[in-house]
Amino acid sequence: MNKDRLIWMYKKMLEIRLFEEKVFELYGQNLVPGTIHLYAGEEAVAVGVCANLRKDDYIVSTHRGHGHCLAKGARLDKTMAEILGKRTGYCKGKGGSMHIADFSVGMLGATAVVGAGIPIAAGAGLSIKLRGTEQVTACFFGDGASNQGTFHEGVNMAAIWKLPVLFVCENNLYAMGTRQNRVMLAESIATRASAYGIPGVSVDGTDVLRVYEAARAAVQRARRGEGPTLIECRTYRHMGHSRIDPATYRPREEVEEWLRRDPIQRLRRGLIEGGHLSDAEVQVLERAVAKNVESAVEFAMESPYPSSEEALDDLYA
Ligand SMILES: Cc1ncc(C[n+]2csc(CCOP(=O)(O)OP(=O)(O)O)c2C)c(N)n1
Ligand SMILES: [Mg+2]
């Protein structure tokens, strides 16, 4: 893979991690309304997929959506402002963490309703097909969402109409406190693809290169008009389900094993050992990313809250 793309992927993954560390900190200071679902540990999924997408391609996100937004090119400052409920945010501060959308970069939106993004992605795929634009839609969702009826209906329709959609399952082994093996007998979610007559692949979601390759093949197939692919990325969230969940239901050895497989540290080692960047160059890059995140926080902190008179603006009635 070319060096620029590798570096872009490292920067993006790190940006997402540092951005969310700030969100976590600000939450602790009572500056984040609602709750937050952090993506730490799963960055390689959003970044490996979005590295294959054009600006006019679409993504559909979930309740754990900050990483998807940033990987698709949403702005750090407007994303942070939205999370803090500020008027300068993507939804003028009225959506918050779980409802960010940025149509200008093809980010069609996050949703708090588990599995609800799957039919939306199929619909976006149908729109692409009717317009004949060779765009694609990548739909992110969790292992839990793959047990919803929307998964069956959305994937089946996309399959029969050969819609250009990547169904990207972030299998982090848990849906809130419920382990995957308690609610489904199939070990791999990718095997479900055969029920719809489409390809299903399962990859190590902590290795951004494996995710990138799987997504590349799926994007090529979609742009050729051959239909959707189901990609299962085996990954893990470093933190609890949401900010208030201490995740005591997870065995310590399991957590430690996955922490050792941190996708960001993994690519960092690869970049240095592969001779793409020196240790010093990596540090320069890391400082630059941290500075960008810092500026986003400053922007969001200095921005005003929406006024009460604006509460009903932009609402459908
Ligand atoms: C339709 C619906 N049912 C239940 C919930 C409550 N809920 C929020 S997140 C979640 C777990 C989702 O698990 P998964 O799809 O694996 O995504 P993850 O949180 O692991 O990223 C549940 C049950 C919801 N938001 N929507
Ligand atoms: Mg899950």
Image (cartoon, grey):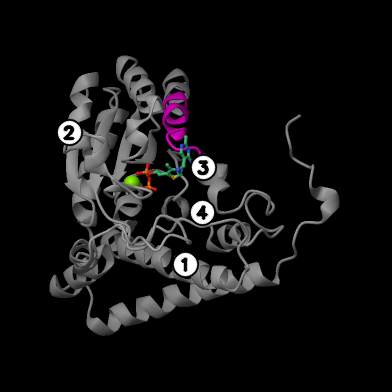
Q: In the image, what residue occupies the spot 26% across and 48% down?
A: 173
Mark 1 → mark 4, Cα distance in angstroms: 13 Å
> What span is colored magenta in the figure?
107-123
Tell me the tag on residue 112: 3
Helix, strand or loop for disc 1: helix
Which mark lies nearer to you, 3 or 4? 3
The picture quadrant where one finds residue 298 is: bottom right
Mark 3 → mark 2, Cα distance in angstroms: 26 Å
Task: Relative to 292, say whether 63 is above or below.
Answer: above
Sequence-wise, which precedes: disc 3 or disc 4?
A: 4
State yes or no: residue 268 in magenta.
Answer: no
Tell me the tag on residue 19: 1
Left or right? Give the position of 164 relative to 292.
left
Asked whether mark 1 and ligand 1 are closer than 8 Å, the reply comes as no
Q: In the image, what residue occupies the spot 55% across and 54% down?
A: 97
Mark 1 → mark 2, Cα distance in angstroms: 35 Å
Which residue has dot 4 on it? 74
Q: Amino acid at mark 4?
A: Ala
Q: Amino acid at mark 1?
A: Phe
| Image location of residue 136, percent across then percent down | 38, 33
Neighbourhood count class around disc 1 (C-alpha, 10 Å): few under 14, some 14–19, many 20 upward: many
| Image location of residue 47, percent across then percent down | 34, 54
